[in-house]
Amino acid sequence: MKIAIVGAGAMGSIYAALLSDAGHEVWAIDTWRAHIEAIRDTGLRVEGASGDRTVTALHVATEVASAGACDLYVIATKASGVGPAARGIAPLMRADSLVLTIQNGLGAGERIAEHMPTENVLLGVAEGFGASMKGPGHAHHNSMRQIRIGELNGGLTPRLERVVAVWQEAGFQARAFEDISQLVWEKFVCNVTFSGPCTAFNCTIGEVMADPERWAVALGCAREAYRLGQAKEIAFSFDDPIDYVTTFGANMPHARPSMLLDHMAERPSELDAINGQVPVLGAEHGIETPYNQTLCAVLRAREAAFPPLRR
């Protein structure tokens, strides 16, 4: 299979390395020129949860147009990069090409729909999956639990099963789901609970949970997100969001959400796709969201003071 990983940052680098090692023709696409040049010159090194390897068979480029028509395009950018990625992919698509988008938060499908029809779009959810960059051409794989994949419009299809098999054969714990929206929302509730609060208070998940005042704020965020899911008739697998997010957080007390890591590096985060989505949807459904609205105001003010992004 010919696969383009659009957004070969930390997570995208893991995807690219393992899929290439499994024998696929993989293109790593990223605007970080130093990273792309390092991969071209000496290969992509990935160490950690999936082993230690240096992959030299990758094709690299800074524009997805260089990859041309592919069987599968994996959008692994941050939420803000989904629209530009889809815009670049749209003219390259064949009738049987598929797009798989894997992001935190909500709205990836809608961002893609602005640039192409969504009949060939799959949604992915990376659960318990972490990665970081140690430098150009060098990624660290922190953890890997499961990649959940589903059709954007629901249902189990032969093409979905084929894509899942590709990921499984590359060493990922991948699984097809009939209702991926449920899983996206369940992860969204957890992300809302911990991303904004951990970032605002500059602490780990465990530290938020251990402090009664901070934990009250986090749970306020969780309740707001859960109420919105109910308003949208999401078929949650749980009835008690507090128990759900508490169990989730207890399994990774030392983790720092990616939003916090972005703020520590003074770069823009995915705030608008995570906690920032709660006030937007709240306004649409007539649901008040004071916890998330307040956190967003604080974090946007902080981001506005960051220096211009240089990469």
Image: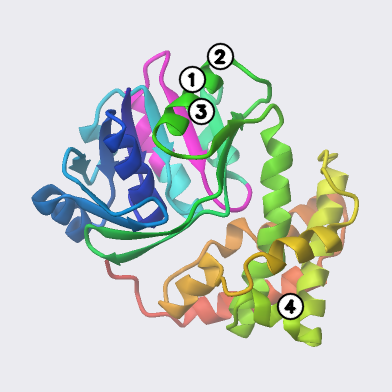
Report, in whole angstroms, how far the alpha carbon at label 2 lies from the one at label 4.
Answer: 42 Å
Does residue 33 appear anywhere in the picture?
yes
Task: Answer few, some or many: residues within 10 Å of disc 4's Cα (few below 14, many 20 plus, some between 14 and 19).
Answer: many
Residue range in magenta is: 85-106
Q: Which numbered disc, 4 or 3, marks the residue that appears first in the sequence?
A: 3
User: Alpha carbon of mark 4 to alpha carbon of mark 1: how far?
Assistant: 40 Å
For the residues labelled 4 and 3, the Cα–Cα distance comes to 35 Å
Check disc 4 and report the residue beneath it: 209
The kind of residue tagged 1 is: Arg
Q: Is residue 168 above or below residue 144?
A: above
Q: Which residue is mark 2?
A: 158
Identify the secondary structure beneath mark 4. Answer: helix
Between 252 and 293, which is closer to the camera in this rendering? 252
Residue located 58% across and 64% down the image: 271
Residue 121 vs residue 295: left or right?
A: left
Q: Which residue is mark 3?
A: 164
Q: Which residue is mark 1?
A: 162
